[in-house]
Amino acid sequence: MSVTHYEFRPYNVGRWLVWGFFALVLLVAPKLFTSSLAITMLTQMGVAIVACLSYNILLGQGGMLSFGHAVYSGLGSYMTIHALNLVSSGGLALPVSLLPLVGGLAGMAFAVLFGYVTTRKAGTPFAMITLGMAELVFAMSLMFAEFFGGEAGVSGNRVVGQAVWGITFGPGIQVYYLVAIYTFVCVALMFAFTRTPLGRILNAVRDNPERVEFIGYNTQRVRYMAFIISGLFAGIAGGMGSLLFEIVTAEVVGSHRSGGYLLFTFLGGATFFFGPVIGGVMMVLASVLLSELTKAWLLYLGLIFLFMVMYAPGGVASLIMMNLRVASFGLLRKVWASYLALAGTALVALAGAGAMIEMVYHLQLNAALGDELRYMGATLNASSVNSWFGSAFVMLTGVGLFEVTRRQFVHDWGEVQVDIEKEIKRREAL
Amino acid sequence: MNTVALNPMNTGGEAENRLKNLANASVALELKDLRKSFGKTEIIRGANLAVKAGERVAVIGPNGAGKSTLFNLISGRFGPTSGEVLLNGQRIDGKKPFEINRMGLSRSFQITNIFPKLSVFENLRCGVLWSLGYKYSFWRFLADLDDANDRADELLDQIRLHKKRDVLAGNLTYAEQRALEIGITIAGGANVILLDEPTAGMSKSETKRFIDLIREITVGKTLLTVEHDMGVVFGLADRIAVVVYGEVIAFDTPEAVRANPRVQEAYLGSVLAESQAAGH
């Protein structure tokens, strides 16, 4: 009998390297990007990473499509800001650095409460109930202005109490490192969770809930416990957000935020543990940078989401892993030319489509500024036939070329996969 | 004479010894006037059965007779409309599948029912976790659970899938998936095993190997299996339960069942004629 334990490698060098690299990135990121906007964005990324990972405990690991995850991060945010204000007024003796845990406990407590109802069902009923819960909480945010702060929200001041070792949490960089520590610990804990009996049975529940019932597990209980754990980390993320922004408004529990978690967790890749980490980074880049670049950013985001669902349902993480697999067999050279061609033609198509989208937005929103607009270094005239014709021509050319290169790529990719299968067979035969 | 009647595995001393031992065994699974209706249609119409501990019972009957429904009632997939199911003397009718499983009854499914996105090893390890007391624990690493890992590896060897240890279960061949299905079923160490058409869709030679495997890994356990292959049925079973129109019309040794005129008339006559015509 073989006694080698699955995944049991006491000195797993690869894993140490990955976690070491992650810690290093968290440590040096603010040294590389030093502007205050960059520091804020990096801090937001930490928050978003924890939030998306906590969401993925439901979506990717448990197969639970929640439309109301912002309820738990958002209520965590509110409890944290209220706790912060209590600390300010002397009603609570707690160091600011521990306040995200208040958010975590709040997220967990609400998950215990709401999850008891939602996790009784799986699949579509689960999704519907979470949607209902989200609407319920959002409606309450308008009803209970004392707690939710009404339109203005609740604000606080994180610079309170005695500074420990000169850390006041006034400067953004100090908040960044606080969030970075929380992020590292939370990511590690959530990864550890995937390696536990409950974590594995949660995967089994995702794959085949009926079978799980026949190996002794109550699937409702499994979902409920996972939901509570997810709520804990969502709440911590919300709490960190409160310390970062020092203001919490009702949108943090809104459906827009819940949709964002779903969207970016999916884009990052729900099937791999690290997918939501990419998703969290993308979330901040999109909402801060893309929204700066163009007013139509949500439309572009929608398009990206659409194409990802159609062509790469495993998200960015799956694209990375598929190519790593190809690379590990030394076959990446066979497809890189196709990749370049795909990227080039996609950019051409996007440039054309983008020009038209921008002209529509210009006509609808900036008509008072005249018909002309600047777009990628060129001047377009939103009411001229030439601009429209030119844009359409560029887009269609791009789409046509893209389709040609895509077919070539599919062919090349298929060949590479066949080669890999052959190689695997050959190695097995040895 | 067709080969159905002659089975090297269950003739002579071994079969007699088994029957002798079983005579003193306690009842492991008992059905008392079990009934199940879907709407106005009564599918199970007062089924009675008492299976002894360690006994191998084949459940046969024509399509639509209610064999799978019977298994679903016993294993808790559906609750019965009336009647009782007793496992080692304890009522289990109306209990949830996981409760029944924890009491020592495990089942497999007619349509392969595994965890396709987990590795073969993970499939089996999931099957052993509850019985080893790990329950919902999230404060221990799977890699450190030596007993669970050893047991899962042992099962891998038993079902001859150790070479496919880290392959995703969804990528196995059909026969391998069937073996894994059985592996998951016995993983938790249940004493009463229900196999719903374990050899469905397999070739003759695969079926033979598979039955040997089932015989081997269910030693000492109570086994109920739904089976259509009469060669398998007569070879494997200590007793045969014939289900026709939701009733157990006969429950006896293979020889007695074969000689039973009611069974001949309702089911077996046509099946034997068919298999003879097919040249078995």
Image: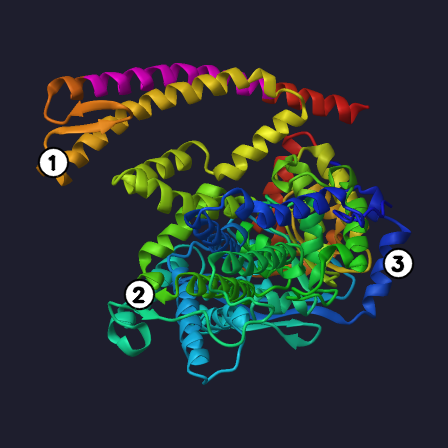
Secondary structure mainly formed by the magenta segment: helix
Name the residue carrying label 2: A250
**Chain for mark 2?**
A
In which quadrant is the C terminus of chain B drawn?
top right
The mark nearer the N terminus, 2 or 1, is 2
Residue, x 36% and y 52% (percent of image)?
A259
2 vs 1, front mark: 1
Residue appearing at x 11%, y 19% in the figure: A385
**Pointer 3 chain:** B
Measure the alpha-carbon separation of dots 1 and 3: 99 Å
Is residue B172 visible to the viewer in this orientation of the structure? yes
Q: Quadrant of the N terminus of chain B?
A: top right
Residue extending farthest to the front is: A166
Rendered view: A148 above or below A216: below
Q: Of tags 1 and 3, which is closer to the observer?
A: 1
**Mark 3 residue element:** helix
Q: CA distance from mark 2 to mark 3?
A: 76 Å
Which residue, given by chain and number where applicable, does mark 3 sit on?
B17
Q: Is residue B47 above or below residue A335?
A: below
Report the magenta residues as a range. Answer: A390-416
